[in-house]
Amino acid sequence: TNRRHASQRMKTRNPMRHAASREKMRLTLRAMRHRPSVRGGNGKPVPLPQRLLAEALGWPTEVILRTGNGYKPHHYKLDIANRALRVAIEIDGYSHMASERKTQDARKDAFLRGRGWNVLRFSNQAVMENLSACVLAVASTTSK
């Protein structure tokens, strides 16, 4: 019986619904100097190669593309993308050399291409050593 009623009870008696309780929690966390942990991924700043190429193109970074239709994952994050042109650019670091990661990348590329996107992949090293060639490759793709 407890499981059946616990959800409703928590909704009606939840102390965080009261402004006084929320303020007390906020002050306690501030006194403790609490800061949420940064765990990588979404918490990290945009890597330098990605930022350099995005600035050179004038395109946004970390573009979220929902997959829809119950497809897993529910969304993909594109390193750099232009929605109007349907061009996605992925900047791959050393971790993308692992076979498991290559499989994930291939699945992502297949999904994007199946929905009419052009996918370009550059290594961190390629962007850092020859940014102009990467920009030229993108320009060549978008002009077609």
Image: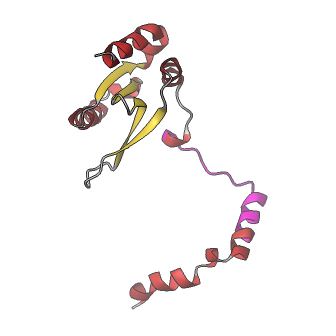
Seen from this angle, which residue lies furthest bottom? Answer: 1
Residue 137 x/y as whole percent: 36, 12
- Verify whether residue 37 appears in magenta: yes
Way the structure is coloured = secondary structure
Using residue 143 as the reference point, say whether residue 91 is left or right of it.
right
Using residue 107 as the reference point, say whether residue 93 is left or right of it.
right
Using residue 46 as the reference point, say whether residue 78 is left or right of it.
left
Using residue 35 as the reference point, say whether residue 44 is left or right of it.
left
Q: Quadrant of the N terminus?
A: bottom left
Q: Nearer the viewer, residue 98 or 58?
A: 58
In this picture, which residue range is highlighted in magenta?
24-41
Q: Quadrant of the C terminus?
A: top left
- Verify whether residue 113 appears in magenta: no
Residue 5 x/y as whole percent: 43, 88
**Residue ID at (44%, 19%):** 124
Residue 105 x/y as whole percent: 29, 32
- What count of labels does the image hold? 0
Residue 11 x/y as whole percent: 52, 80
Q: Nearer the viewer, residue 39 or 52?
A: 52
